[in-house]
Every structure is written in structure tokens, then in C-alpha cells.
Image (spheres, helix red, strand yellow):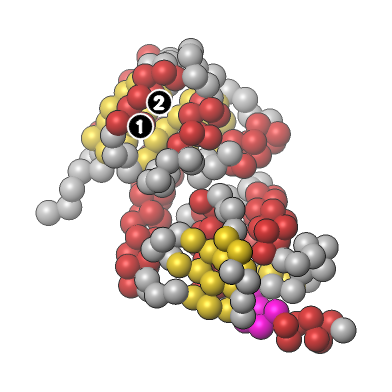
């Protein structure tokens, strides 16, 4: 029998929190509610959660700080930020701090539940994939340990965020294959949603600064104009061709 999934809601508006609780429970989730940032952080640190629905503007610790601290924890917990701050700058900031999704208030409760389900499915799939393909991946001098979530270039450990690691691992498992930004959103972030493609560009640019000898002239993660991105299996060969 499949276990009941545990969802943490961190939201100071009691009306919104109760609506979220009702809809998520109706969908079969077990729900815990924290009414301020301090309580939310304590619940996050003390429990094991399948997803967190996190408001930004909270009494005590704000949602962005909670998200930042969550990404420093050993266990990866999917996070959906909900916020009255709907500008692109705030969406990008939330995603850059490690949120998996961002919904601006007011939002559809049915859409929120659908996105929670998608994130939980995506996390489960990544765990199964890691178990099925736990062996180390070697591409030239790039080495990736999927279980240990460690990546190295030329023996040098890379300081990657969880999302950057997932993106690098996905590319490394499909060398030479071209993926559009929407493909990557679906495969790595777990959803396709117009307007979020920019976060793919941002993550690829940041990843290049960590895995490329010269991020301005990438040899590993290449742009295929008009189509998307791909990882080359042999960066040395790519450099020779460019030369």
C-alpha cells in the first residue's frame, strides 16, 4: 500500500491555509500547517516532507530565507512558493533560491494541487532513476556520482546547487541529444509552463561558469541555435573542431 504523502503548508493567512488544507486532503495528502516563518522552519527541519507550499511574506523568518535554508539541508524537499508578489523579478528570485515552482496570488486551488502532484511524481521518478542508474558517469574529465550527488571536473569538486546538479546529471545521461528549454523544464523541473523558460537559460549560464574552462566559449554544454542545448560527450573534440 502506498504511503500517504506529507505536505507542509507555511502560510499566515488562515483562510488561504484552510482552503489549501481542504483541497490537498481531498486529493489524499496529509497536511500540516505552520502559521508563521519560525514555526514553518521548525517543521521543515524536524520532519520529512514530500512537498512544501511556502508563502513569501510571513511573520518571523520570511519564505525566501526558509527556501534558502531548505536547500542547505541534506534531503531535497520540493518547494512551491505562493506569493502576492507576482513580478518577474520575484519569480526569478524564488526560483534562483531553489524553489521548484512559483504561483502568484490569487491562484487556482486546483492548479496548485495539480502542481503539488506533479512535483511529488517528479521527485519519486528521480529517486527511482537514481537507484536504477546509480553508477558513476564519466564524460571526459567530468565525473558524476548520482547517489552521492557529487560532481567533479578534472578531480576538482563542483559547488552546485541541487537544481544545477539535476540539470548537469540529466545532460550527462543523454550526451549528444538536443533538448529545448521546454523539454528541460519538463524533465528537470517537472513541469512545462510558458514564461518560465528564462530560468533554464539562467541555470545553464550558471552551470557553465562551474563546468567550463571558459564559460564564454563553452565546450561541454552547447547551444544548438533554434533548437536548444546539448552536452557533448567529448569536450576535447569539440575544442579541436572549434579550433
Q: Which residue is mark 2?
A: 41
Tell me if mark 1 has few (under 14), some (14-19) or many (20+) residues whose alpha carbon lies within 10 angstroms of its own.
few
In terms of image quadrants, where is residue 121? bottom left
Q: Nearer the viewer, residue 4 or 64?
A: 64
- Residues marked 2 and 1 touching at CB (< 8 Å): yes
Query: Which quarter of the figure is the C terminus placed in?
Result: bottom right
Please tell me whether residue 168 belongs to the stretch shown in magenta: no
Residue 38: image location, x then y, percent = 41, 18
Which circle marks residue 193 in the picture? Answer: none
Q: Which residues are magenta?
A: 230-235
User: Which residue is located at x 59 percent, y 53 percent?
Assistant: 159
Compared to 39, does 151 lie above or below?
Answer: below
User: Which residue is located at x 64 percent, y 61 percent?
Assistant: 181
Q: Nearer the viewer, residue 23 or 37?
A: 37
In terms of image quadrants, where is residue 124? bottom left
Please tell me whether residue 232 belongs to the stretch shown in magenta: yes
User: Which residue is located at x 65 percent, y 31 percent?
Assistant: 90
Amino acid at each position: 500500500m502506498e504511503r500517504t504523502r506529507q505536505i507542509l503548508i507555511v502560510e499566515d493567512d488562515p483562510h488561504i491555509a484552510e482552503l489549501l488544507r481542504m483541497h490537498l486532503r481531498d486529493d489524499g495528502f496529509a497536511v500540516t500547517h505552520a502559521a508563521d516563518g519560525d514555526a514553518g522552519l521548525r517543521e521543515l527541519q524536524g520532519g520529512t516532507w514530500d512537498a512544501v507550499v511556502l508563502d513569501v511574506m510571513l511573520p518571523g523568518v520570511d519564505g525566501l530565507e526558509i527556501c534558502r535554508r531548505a536547500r542547505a539541508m541534506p534531503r531535497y524537499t520540493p518547494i512551491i512558493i505562493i506569493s502576492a508578489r507576482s513580478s518577474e523579478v520575484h519569480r526569478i528570485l524564488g526560483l534562483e533560491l531553489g524553489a521548484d515552482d512559483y504561483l502568484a496570488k490569487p491562484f487556482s486551488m486546483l492548479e496548485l494541487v495539480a502542481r503539488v502532484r506533479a512535483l511529488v511524481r517528479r521527485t519519486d521518478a528521480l529517486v527511482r532513476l537514481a537507484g536504477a542508474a546509480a553508477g558513476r558517469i564519466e564524460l571526459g574529465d567530468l565525473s558524476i556520482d548520482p547517489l552521492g550527488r557529487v560532481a567533479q571536473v578534472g578531480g576538482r569538486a563542483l559547488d552546485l546547487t541541487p537544481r544545477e546538479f539535476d540539470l548537469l546529471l540529466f545532460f550527462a545521461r543523454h550526451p549528444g541529444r538536443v533538448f529545448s528549454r521546454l523539454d528541460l523544464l519538463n524533465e528537470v523541473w517537472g513541469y512545462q509552463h510558458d514564461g518560465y523558460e528564462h530560468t533554464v537559460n539562467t541555470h545553464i549560464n550558471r552551470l557553465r561558469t562551474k563546468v567550463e574552462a571558459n564559460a564564454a566559449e563553452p565546450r561541454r554544454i552547447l547551444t544548438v541555435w533554434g533548437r536548444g542545448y546539448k552536452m557533448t560527450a567529448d569536450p576535447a573534440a569539440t575544442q579541436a573542431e572549434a579550433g
